[in-house]
Image: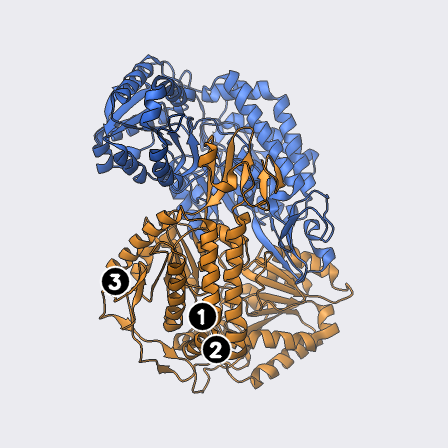
Chain colours: A blue, B orange
Amino acid sequence: MQKILFNGAWTDSSSPRSQFHAFNPSTKAELKERAFPESNWQEIESIVDAAYEAAQALLETEPSTLAAFLETYAAKIEVATDRLAAIAHEETGLPVSPRLAGVEIPRTINQIRQAAAAARSGDWARPTLDTENNIHSMHGPLGGPVVVFGPNNFPFAYNGIAGGDFASAIAAGNPVIAKAHPAHPYTTQLLAELAQEAANEMGLPSGTVQLFYGTAPENGLKLVAHPKVAAVGFTGSRPGGLALKEAADKAGTPIYLEMSSVNPVFVLPGALEERGPEIGKELHASCTLGAGQFCTKPGLVVLQESKEASALIEQMAESFSQTPPGILLTGGGVKAVSNAVEQLKAAGAKVAAGGNVANTAHFGYEPTLLTVDGDTFLANPSELQSEAFGSVCLVVTATDIEQLKAVAAALEGNLTGSIYSESQGRDDDSYAGLAKTLRTKVGRLLNDKVPTGVAVCPSMNHGGPYPATGHPGFTAVGFPASVIRFSALHSYDNVREHRLPVALRKKNPTGTLNRLVNGKWTTADA
Amino acid sequence: MQKILFNGAWTDSSSPRSQFHAFNPSTKAELKERAFPESNWQEIESIVDAAYEAAQALLETEPSTLAAFLETYAAKIEVATDRLAAIAHEETGLPVSPRLAGVEIPRTINQIRQAAAAARSGDWARPTLDTENNIHSMHGPLGGPVVVFGPNNFPFAYNGIAGGDFASAIAAGNPVIAKAHPAHPYTTQLLAELAQEAANEMGLPSGTVQLFYGTAPENGLKLVAHPKVAAVGFTGSRPGGLALKEAADKAGTPIYLEMSSVNPVFVLPGALEERGPEIGKELHASCTLGAGQFCTKPGLVVLQESKEASALIEQMAESFSQTPPGILLTGGGVKAVSNAVEQLKAAGAKVAAGGNVANTAHFGYEPTLLTVDGDTFLANPSELQSEAFGSVCLVVTATDIEQLKAVAAALEGNLTGSIYSESQGRDDDSYAGLAKTLRTKVGRLLNDKVPTGVAVCPSMNHGGPYPATGHPGFTAVGFPASVIRFSALHSYDNVREHRLPVALRKKNPTGTLNRLVNGKWTTADA
């Protein structure tokens, strides 16, 4: 039985009778060599207690120490890249190269380093000084742990113990309780080993990073509502996210969710005429990348009826048919995709390619293209926005531009929305109205581009209106913005100078810290 | 029957049989000359539809137009100060001078002007440009209306149609649906008249500002969960706030709440010895100001047992006894204070002064001082933190500094927390541990100062952890920070330059807009 990471030490679980194994999705075989414990409530509560102690100790930890921890951790991941990629490949079926070793692990390291830079610079905390009335404010740690639930599809970049939520929560000065995703527990354990080594080397409080692998669903709900838990990060399915949201909301605990998105792509008539086949290739590639298991996979394409539209659908049907089924992460994932396709069909979508569970040695579902006309979509927009987490795409054909805009107006909140338009401006009139509608429905609005590929940069918004996430004002990716989620606003009124955080004292502590001083952003002393 | 403000016009309510009157709290007399309608669901839904149309139109309204509207509105309030103050006095019993005409109305005007300045400068939206990958982001309007419920205690500064939530929501580019507080409906109507005049003059979409006076509680819950409602602002009681929160949370709608706070004040032994009588005077003045009807009224004072502590309690009991009962805003408020005092007594608090409904021509409750020892407090911390919205203060006497810190650790989230300490540093050791505990329990930490008096400045945090509010990261007072609550993060990926909001184009639109360009804050062009 593998050990949990509890209060700074790798510890036997106190509930050894309840356990699970991961699977190798490439062979559908259970990975029997390692059993992972399902923690009982008592164990979860001990973890929370230790994390709360750590949270209190972290209130007095310098941001530079947090930054050094993150940098040390990133360096350890970098050194361990090959081993991590090999284990993650076994547990997820994702290719070692380029995906894991060449893309996702470097992105993860980069994210952790950006979080370190954010902690070190301090800009994320928006220090604000008003010298005349001697009131100052900045964002600071929450005083309790952040619980992070990572998803199945990114064993590194969104891992509860290494991903964006983890790095953001630490940069803001909070401890993290990570729940491993059951699809890649050993990958997560290896990451946690590196994290704990780095925490030891930097002398962080012992419960700063903790890991458990699983627990009964009711314990998950109790955990997010625990009075000592200060915030929650969750990336995963909509039903799971909504259950956690309800529990956290009732307890008044901020919860940041990334739950679902069909990432609509609108291709306007001019663009179709100008470069339909090229766009078809991009859509196919984006939809089948990583077997379609991306939060930003384009799952809904909206066209206006035309011979070019028909040709695009024909081309996509052909390319979807000819694409071998990729490896899905779990057996449950195969069922979920299958159910979603059936739901789309029941709501009136027609299969143009694929549509079956793959007859393969690995977990898989055939790349699937479905079509539906605009009238049918508008008659049942909710069912026809069901997310299928795989290479599944529904093409909606609208009778005219007005109906295409009506489809946009009927959309739920999404992470992304794309509009392809003709390069010389022929579609500009249609674009304006469509973009206006789409703008408040999505976190990231794209032009002439598929939504897969999430750049980790300050302007990224990996977020969007409900039900894509739980709040439209926050991003899960990109620094410094993602850090602020795991903080509280702290105002200091008439607090004596030597008692203030250094970021709020008269002297700018680094000479480069950007502060709002008496209404003006400046790096000068106050 | 008074008219509601619906879609740009003063309109007869469609449910005239359901109505209410306000009261004059100075005389307990019903103000029979004006009846205000209680809107039915159909009427509420029409208001929402009109507001949603306005929200869509506002997506294309320039920030400078919003700013001009706010400035015009502020000017109209300024001109109407005397009349507004007179009517508000009649409905609230708050003194015309200095409170209403000299303090609150000028503060309200100042807030609206600061919101206008925020809209005009655009800094609040945090424009972020990454030129290399052509991704840019900023905060923008929500695309739907914001519903604002104002409280009873500030007929202007927190009014649903004139206060901080209103001004912030408009500055971010959203329409507002205001629900008048039933204690001052005519004041609210007069404000709405000025707001609509200003909206007409600036040519804002017709449903940008709307007003209704009341509705059945279940309609309030349906309203905040309406799919077209984009966000909610609420200031008021905890039960009311929690009911709205549950409904909004279920619908995935951001809700910003200010619900309750006892605003603990810790007086350390050195400060007590040094200036006990002076502190006692400050506490008494702060607690009885405005008949104690401030969100930031100090309702809990924590001392360490000593002869100075006993003297302070004696002094405060004396001054509380000698203070005539102020005017409470409503008859319901008298009952609520009375219930809270009974609850405190039932939990072990002893009355040292007051403790009865006032025998006066106006709504009132005797200024009331209660005491409880630290052991009793710690045995029942939840009941003993019941908020009494009046001149009621509970003094906790701790056996020693450790118990005083334990009291701090047992506190719920509060708007403010104050620590008085000796001026030469004698209390500094105790201060450090206490401040650490208090810091994550309150939005604003004060030194040597009572919490009443909320400066409207960028560093203010009128917020705090649950259950003082619904989220620890936001403030309801202070610009630009309060504006961000009513916005969504909008990322633009590969969007053509001429389609970007001007704030995200290469050229800095004002030359002074602060933008994060390629990781550096600057006012230069990108």
**Number of the front mark, 1 or 3:** 1
Specify the amino acid type for callout 2.
Leu
Nearest to N terminus: mark 3 or mark 2: 3
Q: Does B64 sit above or below residue A236?
A: below
Provide the residue designation for mark 2: B94
Mark 1 crowdedness (10 Å alpha carbons): few <14, some 14-19, many ≥20: many
* Quadrant of the rendering where the N terminus of chain B is positioned: bottom left
Mark 2 crowdedness (10 Å alpha carbons): few <14, some 14-19, many ≥20: many
Residue A227 can be seen in this image? no
Mark 3 crowdedness (10 Å alpha carbons): few <14, some 14-19, many ≥20: some
Specify the amino acid type for callout 3.
Asn
Nearest to N terminus: mark 1 or mark 2: 2
The local secondary structure at tag 1 comes to: loop
Q: Looking at this view, is B352 or A505 the one in front?
A: A505
Nearest to N terminus: mark 1 or mark 3: 3
The spot of residue B268 in percent (x, y) is 69, 67
Q: Left or right: where does residue A450 sit relative to residue A165? A: left
Provide the residue designation for mark 1: B155
Checking the image for residue B40, the label placed there is: 3
Quadrant position of residue B241: bottom left
Q: Does B6 sit above or below residue B33?
A: above
The local secondary structure at tag 2 comes to: loop
Q: Left or right: where does residue A56 sit relative to residue A502? A: left
Q: State which chain disc 2 sits on.
A: B
Q: Does B70 sit above or below residue B391?
A: above
The spot of residue A385 in percent (x, y) is 30, 34
Q: State which chain disc 1 sits on.
A: B
